Image (cartoon, grey):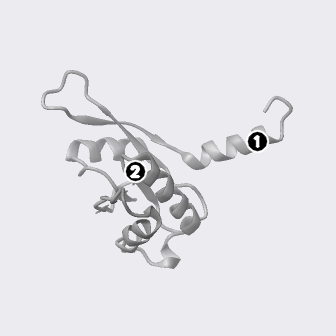
Amino acid sequence: MIILNFSHPLTEQQLTQIQQMVSEPIERVIPLAVHFDNTLSFLPQLEKLMRQIPIQAEEWQSLSILVNPPSLNFITALVLAELHGRMGYFPPILRLRPVEGALPPRYEVAEVLNLQQVREAARKQRYTEDG
C-alpha cells in the first residue's frame, strides 16, 4: 500500500495502526507539502500539488493507495475529485483523532474510511422510495 500524505508526518505508531487496520504492508509513504495561498485560485495550486506525486498515469488504477487528506476542507474536496478522476474510484482515507489527555497533543488513527463504499451506498439510495 502507498500512502499519499497531504498532512503532518505520520509516526511509526500511526503507521503500525494503519497496517493493522488495512491488513496490508505499507510499501511507502509519499509526503506532500500542502500550502495553498488563499489569495490565489486553488485550481492552479492543485495542479502544482498533483504534479509532485511520483505515480505514473497507468499506475493510478492499479496501485493500492490510501490518503491522509489535507486539513483544509476545500483542498481535500479538490484532491479527492482529482484522485477520483485519475483512479476511477474514491480512495480510502485516514481519520485521525486527538489522543485524550495527551501532552503535548498527539493523534492516533481512528479509522480508515472507505469513500467508494459510501458512494455506492448513496447511489443505491437514489433509486429507493425512501432515499
Disc number for residue 87: none
Asked if residue 53 is positioned above or below residue 127 in the image, the reply reads below
Q: Position of residue 8 (x, y in %)?
A: 25, 50
User: Residue at horizontal 73%, vertical 45%?
Assistant: 123
Disc number for residue 69: 2
Q: Secondary structure at mark 2?
A: loop
Q: Residue furthest front?
A: 39
Q: Earlier in the sequence, mark 2 or mark 1?
A: 2
Q: Position of residue 24 (x, y in %)?
A: 40, 52
State the image quarter where residue 101 is shown: top left
Work out whether residue 2 or residue 82 is closer to the camera in this orientation and state it. Answer: 82
For residue 23, side relative to residue 104 (left or right): right
Mark 1: amino acid:
Lys
Quadrant of image for the C terminus = top right
Asked if residue 55 is positioned above or below residue 65 in the image, the reply reads below
Q: Position of residue 63 (x, y in %)?
A: 47, 66
Work out whether residue 19 or residue 114 is closer to the camera in this orientation and state it. Answer: 114
Q: Position of residue 50 (x, y in %)?
A: 41, 69
